[in-house]
Amino acid sequence: MPGTTLPSAPHYVPPPPTKESLEWADLPIIDFSKVGTPEGRAQLAPRVRDAMRVHGFLMIVNHGWTQTQNDRMFDIADAPFSQVSEDEKKRFQTKTQETGTAEGYKMRRVWTIDNGVRDELEYYTFFGQANHPDVLQPFLPEYQQFARHNHFDVLHPILRLLALGMELPEETFVDIHDFNDAAVKYARFLKYYPRTEEDEAKSKNVWLKGHTDIGTITILWSQPISALQVMSPDGKWRWVRHINNALVVNVGDALEMLTGGFYKATIHRVVQPPRDQRGSTRLGAFYFAMCNDDVRLVPFTASPVLQRVGVVRKIDDEDAPTMSEWRKGRSKAYGMTELKRKDDVVEEQVINGVVVKHYN
């Protein structure tokens, strides 16, 4: 934040990228330096359209933040975990299972992963709440800046490109993604902690089962510990490679429903890191975008593309949930309800009348 003295934060030093030989996903890399002009967007729109239909994931470079700003963001992203006492964390513990809103801390070992193994994931979510731990108060302007950059400089251009890919007016999806300057929403910082070898064996090294995200677009700030895997079009799990100061972007359930299946929510999971990175904690910075709470998740059938290729619905339009209903239903159920096994890979549950799949 130019012209101001930033509050002090311990420098977060991640381990170096893995040197292991892994099977990497071949994700398209989109240069965002071109999104500022109609000509640039027209050039990028077909690439983004195809990336989100074929892979569901893409990577973005030249998004407007420097590596120095990125480093600073991870320094303050670590503060909710390394600078806040366990007692204070419990004071700000989320009540997601009661309210469906994931503000504050999700503590470790809340969710069941597999065979009785509990998760080792802790996160802090900014969702417009008025109160935060004292240690985080000095960083609130920077958290706000982080949220604004994700929303206006990354999310909005992506939404414009995706609308162009469906031959809709550029602002179609932007218009249903408002931002409240008074409250940071959907920004989340998380940390995975190492597990015992016994738990790794019981859960087949899976830290978070294969799943799709709740909202419209997920923006992940790339970090060097390899653990994220995406299900490729051929059904194989492949690793997502780290690129300095890049963003990893994917489609969520809400956008799949809004686009009548044209853009499909991406199946991804988190697994134990490769051998040369084990034993380290894995810090993540995310922006989980969702459309406005009152938006009903029905397809934009005015799209000429949908009229040509057809609409695929998860649920009849008259029964479709709003964004608020979908967010709360999925958030309350995640990791807490019993899944019905369909085969050796897929488990299912029904949320708001929609079948939700998990991949183990």
Image (spheres, rainbow, N blue to C red):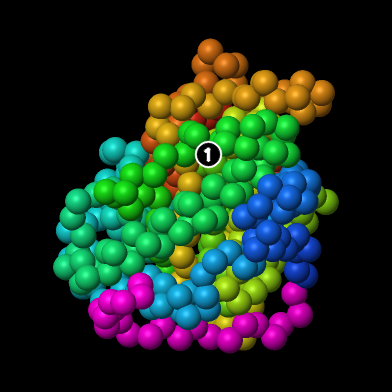
Residue pictured at 69% horizontal, 63% vertical: 31
Q: Nearer the viewer, residue 205 or 265?
A: 265
Residue pictured at 25% horizontal, 55% vertical: 93
Q: Is residue 188 left or right of residue 314?
A: left
Overall secondary structure of the magenta section: loop
Depicted 137 relative to depicted 338: above or below: below
Residue 145 % position (x, y): 37, 62
Q: Nearer the viewer, residue 262 or 331?
A: 262
Check disc 1 and report its element: helix, strand or loop: helix
Badge 1: few (under 14), some or many (20 or more) residues near its Cα, within 10 Å?
some
Depicted 164 relative to depicted 150: above or below: above
Depicted 289 relative to depicted 60: above or below: above
Q: Quadrant of residue 171?
A: top right
Q: Is residue 170 left or right of residue 219?
A: right
Q: Nearer the viewer, residue 48 or 331?
A: 48
| Amino acid under disc 1 | Val
Q: Quadrant of residue 22?
A: bottom right
The residue range painted magenta reads: 1-22
Residue 59 visible, this angle: no
Residue 179 % position (x, y): 39, 44
Residue 209 % position (x, y): 57, 53
Residue 30 % position (x, y): 70, 60
Magenta segment includes 122: no
Q: Nearer the viewer, residue 126 or 153?
A: 153
Residue under numbered circle 1: 174
Magenta segment includes 5: yes
